[in-house]
Amino acid sequence: MLKLTQEGCRLRREQLITAAGVDLLVINNPRHIFYLTGMFSTQLLLSAWGPLALLIDARTGKSTLIAHDAIQSQTPEADVDEVVIWPWYNSAQAAGPGGDLFGDGLKALNANLPDLSGKRVGVEMGWLPFGTPISNPVDLNPVLANLRRHKHPDELALIREALAVTEAGHRAVRQTIRPGVTEMDVFNAIQSALNDALGHAVHVIGDFVSGERAQLVGGFATTRVLQPNEIMIVDLFPIVNGYRSDFTATVPVSESVTPEQARLDTALNAAMRAAEGLLKPGVVAGEVYRAVKRTLAEHGFDRYFRHHAGHGLGLDHPEAPYFVPDSHEILVEGDVVTVEPGGYGPGFAGRIENNYLITADGFERLTNHQTTLY
Amino acid sequence: MLKLTQEGCRLRREQLITAAGVDLLVINNPRHIFYLTGMFSTQLLLSAWGPLALLIDARTGKSTLIAHDAIQSQTPEADVDEVVIWPWYNSAQAAGPGGDLFGDGLKALNANLPDLSGKRVGVEMGWLPFGTPISNPVDLNPVLANLRRHKHPDELALIREALAVTEAGHRAVRQTIRPGVTEMDVFNAIQSALNDALGHAVHVIGDFVSGERAQLVGGFATTRVLQPNEIMIVDLFPIVNGYRSDFTATVPVSESVTPEQARLDTALNAAMRAAEGLLKPGVVAGEVYRAVKRTLAEHGFDRYFRHHAGHGLGLDHPEAPYFVPDSHEILVEGDVVTVEPGGYGPGFAGRIENNYLITADGFERLTNHQTTLY
C-alpha cells in the first residue's frame, strides 16, 4: 500500500515549525496527523474513531504521537520519535471494559504535555479540546492551510494513485451503462472496479444521477432504470489512502442523445479548454471561474451553469483554491485543482471534470478519462 | 429512508436534561447530535466534515443546531427549535472561497452561546473545543453513555434495518463462495448486496479472511484465491443510517472441511447457546465471557479463543457493556449486544456472532443468518 514517506513527513514538520514560530505544536486534526506522520486514521476504520494528538517540540524537532490502544497496531505507520499508547479498549487482550474514549483521550493529552511555562504553543483552533493547561495559544490553521497547497512528491504519488483507481471506476461506467440497467447497477460496478483496482475497499462518494434526475446536479444512485437517449452524470470523489480524487463524466446510455445535450457537450469541453488556458502560478482563482462562465455564455449555456467551476483537492475536498467569482486566491506551484463546467436545463444536463497539478510554468492534466459523450 | 423519530429525539433530550442537572447543554459529538436531533452527519458524506454544535436550554427545552452552509440541505432532518447556519462554503451559490472550517465553527459557536453568567453548563469533555467562554463545565459523557444503553423504539427500528441489510450480505457470501473465487470477489458481492438491500450506498467495514489468513482473526479482503476444504470468516459491521450491526459467520468454501474445523463449529455454537442462557437484565457482563470460555474449554478449544466474547452495539462499535473477564457492568433492558465466540489454531479457525436485544425477562435474538458451517 502506497504511503507518505518518512522524508516527506519530516520535511512537512520542519516547514510547519519554521512557519509557525512557536515552541510547542499540538496537533489534533487526524488529517494533519496523517499529513505530518504518515499514519492514516480514517473514520472508515473501526479502530480509528477517537482522539489522537501529536506533539512537536520546535527546538529539538521531537515528535510524540498520543493514541489509544485500539489503534495501536496502526501506529508503526507513524514516522514519529515516540508513541504513547493509553488504554481505551483492547478486544484481543480482553483486559477490561472500554473507558470514556474522548474524556480519557483528553486526560492522556494532558498527562503527556511538557512543562508549558514560558512556552508559546501552537494549536489548531476548533480542534484543541477544552480542558488542557494551554492558554493564549497561537492558531496554526492558516499556516497549515498554506502549507497544504504546496503538494510534496509523496502527496502527489498518493493523489496519482487515487486518480488511477478512480479511472477504473469511470471505465466501469462505460462498460456497464445501457438501457435497462439501474443507477445502482452502475454504482455497484464502479464500487467493485475501485476495490479491484486498489486491492482494498474504497468508499466511493460521488454523484450518480441519470435522466431527469441529472437536473439535481448530484445525488446518490437509486433504482431508477436508465432509458435510451438519456445521459448519466458520474462524479467520483473517493478517499484513497487519505488523499482525494474528484472527476466527472457525462455518459450516454445509448448511441444517441438529444441535440441540446450534444451542444452542451461541445460547450463543456470548450469551457474546460478555456480554463486550462489560465492554469498557471500567479493567476487569480476567480479568473478561472470567469473563463468557464464566459465560454459557456458563448455557447448559450451560461444561465444553466449553477455551481462553482472547481476547487483545490488534497487531504480535503473541497479545499483552497476555489474557482468562484469572488475568489482572490492566487494559483501556486503545487496546487492540485479540479475544473468542472456544468449545465442543467430543459432537455439537457451534464458536467465534466478534470484534475490538474499547477506546475512552475503551467499545468499537468492528471486525469485521462473520456470527457466527451462519444 | 428510515430515521430517528421526533418523539424519540425529544424524549432523549428530556432524559438528558433530567439526568444532567445543568442549565445549558453544549453537544459537539456528531454521534450525539444525531442521537438527540435525528440529523445523521456521517463523515462518509462530503458535506458532513466540520464542526457542529447543539445547544439545549434546560429550562425551556429549546434546542439550537449550529451548522455550516455546506451541510445546510441536511439540517431539515434535525428536530430542533432553531437552526443557525454560518457561512463556510456553498458550491451552488459559488459566493466566495471557503473559510477556516474549524476555526470559523468555533467562532459560530461562541456567537450563538447565551449569557453564561450564573449558569451551569454541561459539555462533552474531549469534544468541547478550546476557546469558548465556558468555564468549570459539568461532564456529560457518563450521563450520555448511560442513556445510550437503554435503546429507544426508534433506535431499535434503525438497528433492525441495519441487521436486515447486513443479512443480505451474509446471504451473498453463501451464494458467491466456491473454490477459485477471491476474497475480494466475495467482498464485492457483499458490498453490492448491501447497497441493493438498502437502496443506498453502505460502507461495509468487516473481516474477510480465508484459509490460513483466518488465523489473523480479522483483516480486509485480498486477492487470495479460495481453495477446497477451506473456510472464510466473514464479519460484517457496517454503519447503516447511523446505527451499527455486527455479526459473523464462518463459511465453508466447498462441501467438506477438516475434522478439527467441524469440531470447532460444534464448540462455537455450543458456546453461543451457553452465553444466551445468561442474557437478561441483572447479569454481570463478565459472566457472559466466562460462559463462552468455559463451554469452549469443555470442547477443548478455550486456549484458541483469543479475544473478547462480545460487546454492546448502537451508535458505536464497540460500546458498553463489554463481555470481557474484568467487566462488572450489569446488563440492562434495552442493551443491544453481540456474542462472538471464536477459535484460531492448527488446521482450524472460525468465529460466529449473533446480535441480541436484552428484554425485561431475557433476550430477543436479532440476527437470523446461518451460524453453522452446513
Image (spheres, coloured by chain):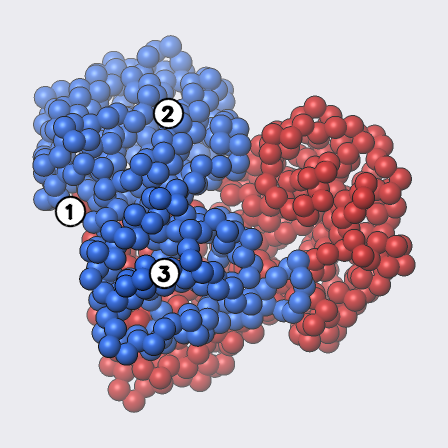
Chain colours: A red, B blue
Q: Is residue A338 left or right of residue B366?
A: right
Q: Is residue A235 left or right of residue A194?
A: right
Report the mark closest to the observer, 2 or 1: 1
Q: Indicate whether B220 appears above or below B249.
A: below
Label 3: element kind: loop
Quadrant of the rendered structure where residue A63 is? bottom left
How far apart in space, not on screen, are marks 3 and 1 (Cα)?
39 Å
Q: On what subunit does the disc labeled 3 rest?
A: B
Residue visible at 27% across and 40% down in the picture: B151
Disc 2 crowd rating (10 Å Cα; few below 14, some 14-19, many 20+) is many
**Front-lying residue, B174 or B82:** B82
Which residue bears the numbered disc 1?
Answer: A96
Q: Indicate whether B38 appears above or below B176.
A: below
Residue visible at 33% across and 49% down in the picture: B10
Q: Position of residue B15 (x, y in %)?
A: 24, 51
Q: Check if mark 3 and mark 1 are on a common chain.
A: no
**Front-lying residue, A174 or B345:** A174
Q: Check if mark 2 and mark 1 are on a common chain.
A: no
Say which mark, if any, is on residue B232: 2
Quadrant of the rendered structure where residue B20 is? bottom left
Say which mark, if any, is on residue B62: 3
How far apart in space, not on screen, are marks 2 and 1 (Cα)?
29 Å
Q: On what subunit does the disc labeled 2 rest?
A: B
Q: On what subunit does the disc labeled 1 rest?
A: A
Residue type, numbered disc 2: Met
Residue visible at 16% across and 38% down in the picture: B332
Say which mark, if any, is on residue B361: none
Report the mark closest to the observer, 2 or 3: 3
